[in-house]
Image (tube, rainbow, N blue to C red):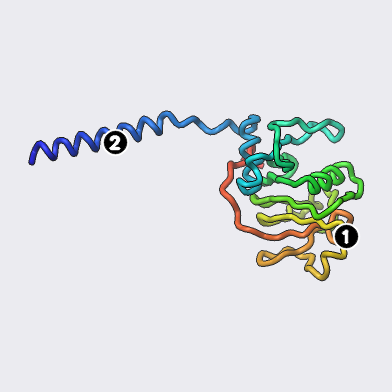
Amino acid sequence: MRRTMALMVVGGLAVLAACAKQEQAAPPPPAPGTPEWKIQNALSAAPEAVTLGAMVMDWPASDTAQPPMLREGTNGWTCVPDDPNTPGNDPGCADEEMSRYWDAWMQRTPPRLGGMAVGYALQGMQVASLTDPFKTAPDSGQTWLEVPPSVMIVMPNPRAYGVLPTAPMAAGPWVLWARTPFAAIVVPVARQTQPQRADSSR
C-alpha cells in the first residue's frame, strides 16, 4: 500500500513538473507597438477563417505616405491594427471592395464599388461623428461615439439601405454616416477576445 502511494505521489510530482516546464517554455506575448503585436492586434478584428490568409497593413506615418505592409496575404482580405488616432482599441479587416472604400475614405473621394463591400470590426470602434465621416475629433465637450463590435456592409447603391435606422442600435443593423457617399450598415455582433492597444492610457 505504501509503495503504491509513493508511486502515485512521484507520478503526480512528475506531471506537475512537466506542466511547470511547459509554462516556462511558453513564449512571451509580443511587446506592444512592435510589428508582431500589430499583426496580432489586427487579426483580432475578424474570424479566423478570414484572418488566416489576410494581408496586414500598418497605418501610414502621414496622409501622403504609403501604408507599410506587415504581412503578405493570400485571400484578398486586408487587416489593419488599432487606429492610433482614436482613444480605444479598434482594428479592422476588409474584403477587396471594402478596401476600395477605405482607400476612398482616406483620399476623401467618393468610393466606386463594383459590388457589396464587407468589413469586420469585432473589437468595436470609435467615431467622432455619426454624420460626418471626415471628422477627426469630437466637438469641444463631446465624447467619442462607441460603435459596438460589428460587421460593416457597404452597398454600391445607397437605396439598398431602405429605411434602416440611423441611430446606433445594439440589437439590430443601423446606418453610420447616412446620406453621405460613405454610408455603411453596422451589424452588431459579439466581441472577441483581443490583445489590448499599445497605449492603454489613451
Residue located at (74% from left, 55% from top): 152
- Choose between 171 and 127: the one closer to the eye: 171
Q: Callout 2: helix, strand or loop? A: helix
Q: Label 2 amino acid?
A: Val
- Choose between 36 and 134: the one closer to the eye: 36
Q: Callout 1: helix, strand or loop? A: loop
Q: Is residue 153 above or below residue 52?
A: below
Give the image quarter of residue 78. Answer: top right
Residue located at (13% from left, 40% from top): 5
Q: Label 1 amino acid?
A: Asn
State the image coordinates of residue 84 (x, y, percent, origin top left).
72, 39
State the image coordinates of residue 53 (x, y, percent, origin top left).
66, 39
Residue assigned mark 1: 157
The label on residue 15 is 2
Q: Is residue 107 above or below residue 158?
A: above
| Left or right, residue 28 beside residue 178 | left
| Residue 201 visible, this angle | no
Q: Residues within 10 Å of mark 1 (few under 14, many from 20)?
A: few
Looking at this view, name the residue that lies furthest to the front.
74
Q: Quadrant of the N terminus?
A: top left
| Left or right, residue 169 beside residue 193 | right
State the image coordinates of residue 173 (x, y, percent, origin top left).
72, 64
The label on residue 36 is none
- Choose between 134 and 94: the one closer to the eye: 94
Compute the Cα span from label 1 to label 2.
Answer: 62 Å
Residue located at (65% from left, 43% from top): 51
Q: Quadrant of the C terminus?
A: top right
Q: Residues within 10 Å of mark 2 (few under 14, many from 20)?
A: few
